[in-house]
Image: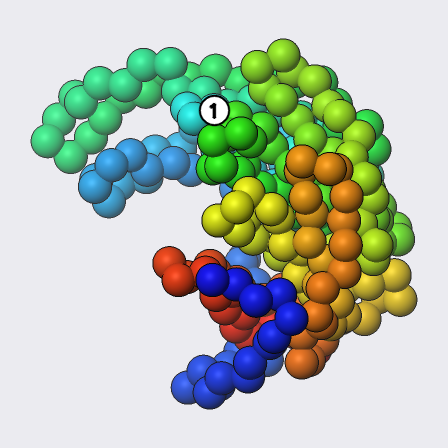
Amino acid sequence: GLSVGDWVEVEGMVSSVTTPSTVAGDVVGPPLLTSAGPVTRWAMLKAPGRALVDHSVTAVGDLAVVVGGHDGTNYRDECSLFEITTEAEVAADARQFAYTWDSGTDIPAARSRHRALAPQHPQLRGAVFVTGGYDGTALDTCYRYDPADDSWTTLDSMTTARYWHELVELTDGKILAVGGFGGGGTPVTSVELYDPATDTWSTVSSMNFPRARFAVALTSSGEVVVSGGLT
């Protein structure tokens, strides 16, 4: 299982990317794309009213919850709900969808570069947890969104303001916030643990190196693996 007191450095990746790749076109990007099942075909769908970057999309059952982001001018506080209402196979390699975009209640404070997580623990399933982010400065605020009644709950703030960090749900339902950019705009080593039962964040052992915009995964044996990122 996870030991929050120990970080172990492992062998690096075979190659690394030092400059992020860019996509040709406007910074606001193309419309939403989706793929269903094993079919390797993408269907272009109507976007939810405005183009966004640095937002979050989180699946809760058949619902996709889109929160915050930046529209090229302003930080956003909207919450949009996407749901496929019907699906039919119209050919061997194509499906037809009917879907809806609905407006949910706005998150209490606009943000981008945040992280969102839909826990799978039985006592937490059905909710979306949103942590940190950026609105011109790093944020430590956290919220819980419940799609069932379209409501936001303000949670305990993190001990460290951070954005472009990562979240990991542990097997006991607690949530780990790892790294990211801190209040000074530089990557941090700090790691903290959220306990939903007590609505509290507590610091745990820091990583060996500061990093942001990295990848993270939880193994079946309970270890948290962090890879790459900016330092």
Give the amino acid type for the residue marked by disc 1 in the picture: Leu
Q: In this view, does 224 lie to the left or right of 56?
A: left
- Give the residue drawn at x 67%, y 36%: 197
Image location (x, y in percent) of residue 73: 80, 41
Q: Which of 30 and 210 is in front in this view?
A: 210
The residue that label 1 is drawn on is 63
Res 76 seen here = no
- Give the residue drawn at x 34%, y 33%: 43
Q: Nearer the viewer, residue 209 or 94?
A: 209
Q: In this view, does 26 lie to the left or right of 69?
A: left
- Give the residue drawn at x 84%, y 54%: 159
Image location (x, y in percent) of residue 62: 41, 24
Q: In this view, does 225 lie to the left or right of 44?
A: right
Q: Which of 221 and 99 is in front in this view?
A: 221
- Give the residue drawn at x 60%, y 76%: 7
Image location (x, y in percent) of residue 1: 47, 62
Q: Quadrant of residue 56?
A: top right
106 lies above or below 209: above
Q: Nearer the viewer, residue 178 or 181?
A: 178
Image location (x, y in percent) of residue 83: 45, 20
**Quadrant containing the C terminus in the rendered view:** bottom right
Q: Quadrant of residue 61?
A: top left
Residue at the farthest left position: 92
141 lies above or below 50: below
72 lies above or below 94: below
